Image (cartoon, rainbow, N blue to C red):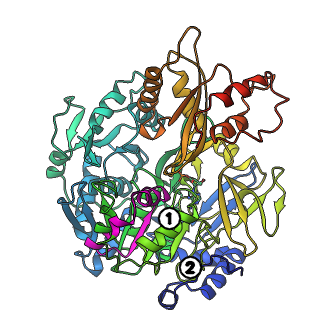
Amino acid sequence: MSTQSLYKVPGDIAANALINNEQYKKMYQESIVNPDGFWREQGKRIDWIKPYTKIKQTSFDDKDLSINWFYDGTLNASANCLDRHLADGSDKIAIIWEGDDARDQRTLTYGQLHDQVCRFANVLRSQGVCRGDVVTIYMPMVPETAVAMLACARIGAIHSVVFGGFSPDSIASRVNDGQSRVIITADEGVRGGRSIPLKHNVDLALEHPDVQCVEKVIVLKRTGSDIYWVEGRDIWWHSLMELASEHCPPEEMGAEDPLFLLYTSGSTGNPKGVLHTTGGYLVYAAMSHEYVFDYKPGEVYWCTADVGWITGHSYMVYGPFANGATVLMHEGVPNYPSPARLGEMIDRHKVNILYTAPTLVRALMAEGKEHFEEYDGSSLRIMGSVGEPINPEAWRWYHEVIGHEHCPIVDTWWQTETGGILITPLPGATDTKPGSATRPFFGVKPALVDNQGNILEGANEGNLVLLDSWPGQMRTIYGDHDRFVLTYFKTFRGMYFTGDGARRDEDGYYWITGRVDDVINVSGHRLGTAEVESALVAHEKVAEAAVVGYPHDIKGQGIYAYVTLIHDTEPSEELRQELRQWVRKEIGALATPDLIQWASGLPKTRSGKIMRRFLRKIAANEVTNLGDASTLADPAVIDTLIESRLNRS
Ligand code: WT7
């Protein structure tokens, strides 16, 4: 193994870890050579109502696509996350909650969480929610959000969590796509000292003429602020809970019955409703949470993601609760009111495992080490990173300042679609290299292919694909199975295409290089350039828009928009601000363009296709080696764009 910048597994970690390097190699081999045998055993970590006898029935052939796991078994996800832990003592802590204001502290035991989930499941039933119905959840980071999700799972309803930062329009399109009859929300959320008008956003979404499906809005009182109220439609969470019984037997679900929908951006069109099913997803989330974080009973685990993203689903709710873990949940952001907050929380709650994103590490790094002078950090054992490639500089800072050079870092690569972590170090098994997600997890068969789909061997760089199924994989795009097949299985026949590029080094380690499609990654959040473009052109003064990502110190990628205004409209700073606000209102704050360049024309081929690679380079301030512009209808456009480019850093 090349030793350049290699961080060895610490001896004490390796000695006590669930998986050491020998075990990793043996189990990985078994999982690939004999998947049925491997998963037959792993499936047993979950309680089944009717045990499975069938394990894996999968094909990535686009003509005959099928993905089925444990498919004759039945189970209930909420019972696996709650009921089965009550036997070892219902007063084990499930959730430690800290508010945006650190004086707000709550804990919920597994017994209390079970009680709340059962009651709320009965509430949902009383509001007419049935097995198979889609329920939209637009909530802040409070324990009740986990209660709402698990209550859906308990009665076999499909939850669709919409991140609290999304706009009314984004809520409306998701609610409509799932034909949700019930929305669960809160009066307001609180983040970084500011309140977020969640109920107001739902009200606006429901004013949309297209949204006719919603009958009930269940409202949690979080801040007690004044809100608009529609009699008959809106109901308080607490008044329903008072009347609800705490007895709610879990619904018996098939392994392949839907568990949840979660929308994510693609390179074209509207966000896709990624559908995950019950059995395989839960086995995969539980197993990967245990092995990747080397989770041991009694440890305090903190994932800083919002529950509105897949990380919040798999590694704040389903994985940890299936394992009976103690989860720290934070309402706000870990660098508010000061960058010291992260360290204070680790010390206050004796956090053993921390899972966060490179964008936070870079933001803290920019603030300086001095905020961690009083940080003790002795409880911390394992640290994770997710959402985007972590640059080696940020990796080292994280390792040194937060991990005091003794905590292994697991840089976990995965996607909303994959349900769980696919490429990652294991703390006790894998020597790490800053910036590399390292090796495949059990059952995962990654490969690199060239643009024609030929498999590349050895140390190489190409498109990252997966050659075989794993239990946590998404099963379809809700309501659009053809789009599912087209998006993931048609680019390279017989393979799942991730949309990412990657390099594999001489040690077989994977280095994710980023998206190779028109998806950008802003602070670890995925955004389709097409979505931002369609928001921009919906503005009356915009004739045309092209959006690309560009390197950004904190966010990883920033949003760079080229905008052509309609005839006779003068560009101005005011209009630029108006357009930024407009996109924010249309999609949500995370989609706000960082830079807007006025463009009298865009580089197009003679057939009218925008040549985005030129735009990407100009936005990245890489203007010396632009490549062949001879296929452009008007090559002079390029010079004009270069002259007035905005990112000159
Ligand atoms: C995309 C998926 C998985 C939860 C968070 C994001 C990028 C994710 C890493 C990583 C390099 C990463 C990829 C991927 N990504 N983790 N450790 N190293 N890139 O989920 O919104 O579905 O985005 O995030 O580009 O395709 P998502």
Q: Is residue 603 left or right of residue 514?
A: right
Mark carried by residue 39 = none
Q: Secondary structure at mark 2?
A: helix
Image quadrant in which the N terminus is located: bottom right
User: Between disc 2 and disc 1, whose residue precedes?
Assistant: 2
Mark carried by residue 385 = 1
Say whether residue 286 is visible.
no
Q: Quadrant of residue 3?
A: bottom right
Q: Amino acid at mark 2?
A: Glu
Numbered-mark total: 2
Is residue 232 shown above or below 127? Answer: above
Range of the magenta residues?
Answer: 346-372
According to the picture, the residue beneath numbered tag 2 turns out to be 41
> At 27% across and 37% down in the image, what residue appears?
197
Q: Disc 2 versus disc 1: distance between alpha carbons?
A: 28 Å
Is residue 161 shown above or below 383? Answer: above
Q: Is residue 216 magenta?
A: no
Residue 367 percent across, percent down from the top left = 39, 57
Report if the beta carbon of the residue with label 2 is closer than 8 angstroms to ligand 1: no
Report if the beta carbon of the residue with label 1 is closer than 8 angstroms to ligand 1: yes
Q: Amino acid at mark 1?
A: Ser
